Image (tube, rainbow, N blue to C red):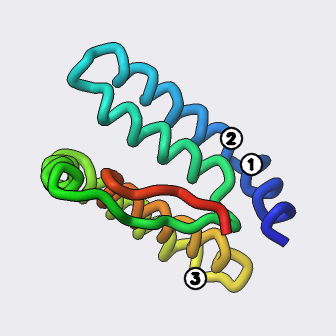
Amino acid sequence: MSLIANIIWIIFGGLATALAWCLAGCILCITIIGIPLGLQAFKMARLTLAPFGVDIAYGGGAASTVANVVWLVLFGVWMALAYLILGCLYCVTIIGIPIGLQLFKMAQLSLLPFGAEVIAR
């Protein structure tokens, strides 16, 4: 079932969004300071390409916590809020609930990406 859902997801915007995240990651990796942010963009691209059948596992240590605080202040709140609003809009209809749930997963990763891993179930 995850395969079919991921194919539908890719056709209706997942591929374009994942490519945009990859482009953002490449642009961020141009400078040494931007490399950690670029790696998080690649992580978002991985989740955005095929979100069905994957989970987010958190780990890391003090460095991840500090990086997440900086990310949260600069980008995380706004990205997570956008994903949450979009997820709520999709959950209004029964057919949109699975997509809305995946958008909530993306909101979780966009809020605190450092120390998180996208793992297949």
Q: Find residue 48 and report its horizontal and vertical position in percent.
A: 58, 50
Q: Earlier in the sequence, mark 2 or mark 3?
A: 2
Left or right position of 47 against 121: left
Mark 3 nearby-residue class (10 Å; few <14, some 14–19, many ≥20): few
Residue 15 bears which disc, if any?
A: 2
Secondary structure found at label 3? loop
Q: Amino acid at mark 3?
A: Val
Q: Horizontal and vertical percent for residue 13?
A: 67, 47
Hey, which quadrant is residue 57 in on the image?
bottom left
**Tags 1 and 2 touching, CB below 8 Å:** yes
- Based on the displayed image, in which of its 4 quarters is residue 6 positioned? bottom right
Q: Secondary structure at mark 1?
A: helix
87 or 49, which lies in front?
49
Compare residues 93 and 10 and report the one nearer the observer.
10
Is label 2 or label 3 in front? 2
Q: Earlier in the sequence, mark 1 or mark 2?
A: 1
Task: Please say whether residue 79 is visible from this viewpoint.
Answer: no
The local secondary structure at tag 2 comes to helix
CA distance separating discs 1 and 2: 5 Å
Q: Is residue 4 above or below residue 75?
A: below
Q: How many numbered circles does the render carry?
A: 3
- Give the numbered dot on residue 92: 3
Determine which residue is flagged by label 1. Answer: 10
**Tags 3 and 1 in contact by the CB under 8 Å rule?**
no
Give the alpha-carbon distance from disc 2 to disc 3, as whole Å: 24 Å
The residue shown at (58%, 82%) is 92
